[in-house]
Structures are given as structure tokens and as C-alpha cells.
Image (spheres, rainbow, N blue to C red):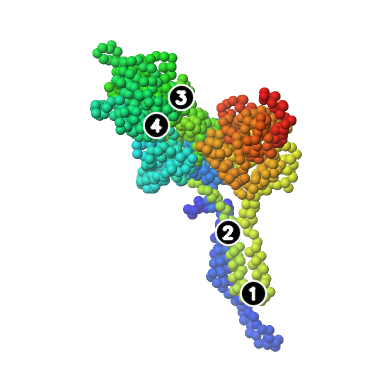
Amino acid sequence: MMFGLPLAFTAPFVLAALVALPAIWWLLRFTPPRPKEVAFPPTRLLLDVEKQEETPSRSPWWLTLLRLLMAAALIIALAGPIWRPLAEATRGDGPLWLLVDNGWTAAPDWEAHLITAERLIDQAEEDGRPVLLAATGDGPGQQVLPTSAAKARERLRALEPRSWAATPDELQPALRQAANETPPGSITWLQDGLGGDAVNRFAEGLSQFADTPATLYMPDALPLGLKDARNDADALTATVIREGAGNARNVTVQALDLKGLVIAEATASLGAGDPQADVRFELPVELRNEIARLQISGQDTAGSVQLIDERWRRRTVGLISGEAPARAQPLLAPLYYLRRALTPFADLREPRTLDLTTAVPDLIAQNISVLLMADIGNVPPETSDALRRWVGAGGVLVRFAGPHMAARSDDLIPVDLRSGGRALGGSLSWEQPQPLGSFSENGPFAGLPVPEDVAVSRQVLAEPDATLPDKTWASLADGTPLVTAMALDRGWIVLFHVTGDTSWSNLPLSGTFVEMLRRILSFSVATASTPAQGETADKATLAPMRLLDGHGRFSSPTITAKPVAVADIDKTEPGREHPPGLYGADDAFRALNLLKPDAGLVPFDPDRLGAGVTVESYNRAGPLDLRAGLFVIVFLLLVADALAVLVLGGGWRLLQRPTGMTAALLAGLLVAGLPSDSHAQSQASTAPRERTVRDEQWALEATLKTRLAYVITGNPAIDETSRAGLLGLSYYLGSRTALEPGEPMGVQVETDELSFFPLLYWPIDEASPTPDEQTMARIDAYMRSGGSILFDTRDQMGGNAATGGYGASPATLKLREMLSSLDIPTLEPVPSDHVLTKAFYLMETFPGRWNSGDLWVEASPDAETMSDRPVRGGDGVSPILITSNDFAGAWAIDETGAPLYPTVPPDMTQRELAFRSGVNIVMYTLTGNYKADQVHVPALLERLGQ
């Protein structure tokens, strides 16, 4: 910093020449006198010419000032001025420790993080220093050792913001060991602004084992967060939080459906000094239940998103009682307690009549999700059939016992009952009221604390049989069932063996009763996420389906993501092993959100690093060398000075002559036509790197040996997986077939010659820019000339890659956007009689790292006119193949030949089938449909067993 400005000089001693400006001013005051034009007289007249002593004239003040400015600009330019210089604390003799926070709060300024880090690495490279690069969000599994600046730069470009908070304290042991081996020369921490206990521990530990002044880069403010989504009686509500207290502002929150379409927008008003504010979506229940995601507009972070699953859906619940309202006391009636328990999270519907034959169909017609029947012992047969159909379609029937059920019951109950009830603690009984014993691990109540104050004085007893333990969700201390249930097609029938009021127990008075009902309501739709009969909740898990990245976008599950236990989904803390996102299956999933209801945004305190810390702010522009601009100014001032001298000296008269005018114009045009350095650099930097057939070395490598090729996406991780995958497939081809391909090559579809390769593997990266029209025209020409492209969206859990459909992922949407400008033929999943299924191996499916996606090819024109031939004929090879099974991930191997990524699910047979799928695809593109010829029919029929 100089003069309070972000300005520094590479040679500040040159500025001492500015003290010579007064002397320069004194010298520049004078200028030669202006010459006079005198007509030459006869020689004799020379004697009469009076001799005069000539004295110099003074320069005009503005000319002197012009020359002083030129001299000052030249001196300052020679001093090497730098605007926004890097902090001096980053320089040193030892390794540069570059600690990069890549938690979710770094996402809004991630580009600034990368720009700053790359400048620091460039500076270390100039100084010849190694760089220790550590990402605080990636945990201790990364390499924490000093490396060359080139390797550090390569690692930096592969970093991405994570969807969880950074955990720098996990790096302390590795950093301490690195400091013991080679002390750091300087430490720079690119902080994301978020504090907390873990960050504070790391900062205090860093100042202890690394005795080096640290430079800390801090963002201006933390991004906003969204937490605590709840579906209240009249609105879907969430809470917007911010860092500490600030000025009043309005925040727009969007509600989106599963397809990403905006359903509604609402505004949260943060008052001056308010750390949080609620946002409310007052919509009809049916529309609220379509909401799958809440996000803060303009905040592209995982913390600004709240995912909504079935637990947030507001159910429509029907209530029917077997007791007439006129005979029941309002505060003691069974429906009173049920209403109070369900009102906060359900919309209640009650029939206008007690006639079950009319009441039940009327409630079902209102699209109820759950039906609660209190003390109804026998349901008429006609109504029973309607209830069975409704339950089979996904409804949940919850029944409560009572005097009517104790006397007589129909078969719409999960277990057989003994006639009569069991009285506990009565005058004719020696038994005492029984407390609640336990919740079964195979039911939705698993994990609920058992209340000690709940006691049951009467119940209906179940007939014991072999299936009773599997149907019991809750039991009393003596082991008798309190709640039983059974599945009926897609729905459930649940029975409370006590009444819905307090006449048989005090369970309706407890908070446990409310939580039990809330969990039962989730069965109305999402039953697949609940443990199956005989499976404990500790063992039942939800596999990662679609996870959030640091920018709050959906992405495919990573190899480090692990399943979440059903019982622990609400208690799971998001992190590397359990990133926020959706877990389960498409028809039944659970949302794991980053910010819990009690979360807050605590900024980091730089004083935790101790004295001597230098705090800087991120700047996307970076250092700017001002020398070029100053030299241009000096040149322009020099030209202005020359023109001024020319005019003052009378030289302007030369312009009145034709030859002088022409010369001046030519000189001006010559100066104006010379390209500036900045323009030349701009042209050099923007000229695309062309690698065409003229590049003989590259062309020879591509053509002298058959090679598999992949499209370079610009994402280092994806490109490395593609290279390793095609390398593994090439080795497999060499060991199993007569083809011995060379090592795979990466191609730039914008510039490289594509006709050298019969097959291109193109992994779709949703973050990459869409190819322009010229590039897509090259791709179209390649496919029309006989080439084939295998597009892989690598997201089999995100929907149908070829046709979209439910839950289309960003990669699928990107592929559809790319192909929209091409003349793509009609596609179909590979049929059983397609040549691809017999090109080398006999295949039924084409799995990759995933196994549930389809392989799509061009639909054969003769599909409807096929006879009983075992192989479908066709006019040629399909120019386009689309999959979502991540073939390269299944084929990828390391230097030792070991797989890089596990298959999902882990299965060696699936990996073998993935390699065989690759062999069939390669043979299909190389040999075409020759297996459809009649000469191969006998051999195929023999192998097929026909």
C-alpha cells in the first residue's frame, strides 16, 4: 500500500529521480528563438543590415508543464508500478503453504478463490519455491506435502466447492508433520469466512506449530442460508439466516417442483439488526405438496437450498368415530385428541354422516392420504371392499380399539384379536397398569425414546402366531402388542390396541403419541424408505440418489458418499461421507439438508491466528502492471511536444506545401496503423489453438494404430476417468480379441480431425459450455460420414438419458440441449435381437458402473417386419449411442491394473459385463451389422439354444 492506495513499485529507488524535476523545469523554460524569413537582398545591402545580439525566448508555461509531465511519467514507469500487488507476507524462502477453504460458503466467490490461489502459485514459481496445497473441505485423505508449483496448479484446477462446511482441524496432524520435516516459508489461508469451533481450533493450532506470519484472505460477507422448512397448517414456512446483524433487506425465495419449474416466489424481510426472518408460501395444500425444493434466489450455494421430501408433504387425513358426537363429551371424545395431535401437520376431513357406506366413499373422493377410524368394530362388506382398494393403491388405514372393536371386529386389521378386552388394574384383576415397553426396530417408531409416564389400563389382545413379532411396532412392558401393522399392496393397515382417548391409557396425552402419528402419516406415499418386514432399522439404509454440489446443483453420487441408515437420517450431520441431497429411490426418498433447524452462520475471527496476521480481501482482477500504460502516455506526450515545437517554430508552414502535407499524412497513418502490444497480445491470446491434419505427428499417432478416443471436456477429473477407462478397455480388447488398440487419445471436438476415430466416447459435463453451431456442424458431419459417438451422462439415478422423464439430471438436460440442434434419428433401448447383443459376446444388458440405465441406439427401420431371425438387420451402424451407466468409471484402471472406482452395487460380475459391453460396442462400430447376415444364423441359433 502506498499513499493509502493499493499501489507498489518493483524498483522504488527510481522514484528518487523525481527530485530532479525542478532542475528539468529550469532547463525547459527556454526554447530557441523563432527563425525569421528574410528575402535575400543584393550584396551591397548586406552592409546596411544592423547586427543585433540574439537572446533565447522563454517557453510557454503549458509546454513546460507538458514536458514535466512526460518526465514524471517516464520516471514512474521505470519504477515499475503495480496496481493491487500481492501481499508481501506471501513471499519467503521456504515452501508456500496454500490452505484453500472449499466448503459451501466458498461457492459464491469460488472464482476469486481460484484466481487468487493461481496468482500465489505463479509467484511461488517465479521465486523457485515449492507449494503445499491443502483443501480444507477434502479431509485428511489428500496429499499434504510440498510439491512443485506445476503440480499444485494442476491440483488447484481440479478443486471444487463442497456441499458441506470445511473441516480444517482434520488437517492438523498432517500439517504438523509437514512442518516438522520442512518448516513453511509463508502461510496463506484462503478462508471462506465461516467460523466455528473446528475452525477456531485449527487457527489456534496453526499458530502454534507453524511459527510463520500468516496471510489471511477473507470474503466481504457470508452468503445467506436457508433452514428449518416446515409445512404449517396454513403455509409452507422456512427461515432465512445471515451473518450476525445487518441492514434491512428483502430476500426472494423460490419454490420449485421436481422438474425444476418455479411454483411460487415469496419474500423474507430481514429488518435492521435481525439475524433471521421467516418466509411463507401461502398456497393450497395440493400445490404445496408439489414443492420439492426451496432456494434463495441469486445464492448458488448448498446452504441456500432446502430439499423437501414426503415428510414435508401435508397429508389430507380423514377422521371417523364410532361414537355419535351427541353422546360424547367434546373434551373426552376420541376425535378430540386426534384432531389436536394432527392439526399442526395435516389437513383434516370429517364426514357429514355417520353412515359408513356413505362416509367412507365421500372421504376417499376427497383424495385423503390417511384414514383414522376410532372404535369402529365392524365395517360393512361393501365399504370394506372400497377400503381395501384404497389401501392397496397406497392409502394408510389407522384404527383405534374401543368397546365396539373389543366386542366384534372385521378382517381389516393386521392381526387376529381375542374377543373381549383385557382390563388391567380393575377391581377384578390382580394385574397393574402396564407401561410402554419398547418400539420395534422394524417399524417407523424405531429410535423414538420410550416415555416413562405412559401407562395402559386396558387393551385388545392379539392372538399369538408366528407372524406377530414381525407385525408389532410397539409393545408393552409385558411383551403384549400395543401397535401392530401389516402391508397391503402399496398401503398399510395399522392398529392401536388402545382407544384414541384417555379411557384406556394416557398415551394420547404424551408427546410420543403426536410423533407416532406423524411418522405413520409418512407411510401414505413413501413406504419404500421404511425397513421391510424382518429388517431392522439399524441395517436398513438409504443409498445416495442425487446429491447437491457446493453450488446447490444436483449431481451424481460420488465414490465417497455412503448410504444413510433410515433411523439416523434426521440425526446425520452432512459431510464428506454423507453429502446433502436425496437418499433412497425415485419413488421413495429422504432429503438430507445441510443446515439443521438450530444452525447459524458464525463468521471467522482473524485474531484467532494471533498477532502478525495480514488480512487481505479477494480481488478477481489481480495485480495490474501499469508500465505499459505509462509508456504509452510518455509516447503521446512526446508526440504532443514535437507538434508544439513544430507549430511554435513555424514548421506548420510545411503543411501548406503539397509534399509536406503528404509526408505528414503518411507519417500519421503509419503511426496509427502500427498494432499496439496489447492488441497483439490480445490477438495471440484469443487465437484458437488449431490441431488439424497438418499436424503430422498427431495425425500419425491417430492413424498408424487403431485407437479409442474420448472428448476432452475441460474437467480434469472427468477427462482422467475417460482416459483411464478407455485404457482399461483397450487392455481388455487386446487380451480377449484380435484387436490390439493403442493408448486412447483425447480430442478437442472444436479443432481436431474426428474422422481418424470410428468411435468417440463423450462424457457429459453439465458445467461445460454448450458447443457452438460450428462445432455441432462438425459433429453432425462426423456422424453422417460413418462415425459413432457414445454419449454417457453418468447419472443413471437422474432419469432417462434419452427421453428425459422424471427427475432429469443436469447432465441429461445438458445432453438434450446439445442434441437439440442435430438431426438425431429415432432412438430405442437396445432390443434383444439387435446386433449389439451378439457383436462379440451374447449380452442382455449393458451395465457400467451403474446397472439400471439403458443403452439407446438408433431404432432399426425394419423392427416391425422382423421374422424369427435371432439378429435384427439394419442399414448400418447407429451414429449415436446414449447411456447413463458411466462406462468409463467401470473400465477405469490404475497403473497396476486395479479398478479405480467401485461398481454400484459392488459386484465383480457387473464389472466383467461392463467390459464385455465395451467390447461389443467397439466391435459393432468396427464391423457393422455383419452378424445379421444369414451365414451366422446357424451358429447363433446353436449358442442361443433355439
Which of the labelled discs sits on residue 531, or is there none? 3
User: Closer to the camera: disc 4 or disc 1?
Assistant: 4
Q: Is residue 12 above or below residue 282?
A: below
Mark 2 or 4: in front is 4
Whichever of callouts 1 and 3 sits on the residue coming sooner in the sequence is 3
Q: Which residue is mark 4?
A: 369
The span from disc 2 to disc 1 (Cα, nearest Å) is: 30 Å
Mark 2 or mark 4: which comes first in sequence?
4
Residue at the spot x=39%, y=31% of the render?
A: 369
Q: Secondary structure at mark 4?
A: loop
Q: Nearer the viewer, mark 1 or mark 3?
A: 3
**Three-letter code for the amino acid on which mark 1 is drawn:** Leu
Residue at image mark 2: 630
Distance, label 1 to label 3, CA atoms, is 97 Å
- Sequence-wise, which precedes: disc 4 or disc 1? 4
> Which comes before the other along the chain, label 2 or label 1?
2
User: Tag 4 or tag 3, which sits nearer the N-term?
Assistant: 4
Question: Disc 1 marks which residue?
Answer: 655
- Where does the image place residue 265, in percent across and percent down from the top left? 41, 45
Question: Rounded to the nearest whole Å, what is the CA distance between mark 3 and mark 2?
Answer: 73 Å
User: Counting other residues with Cα less than 10 Å from the Cα at mark 4, is it few (<14), some (14-19), or many (20 or more)?
Assistant: many
Which amino acid lies under the numbered mark 4 shown in the image of this protein? Ser
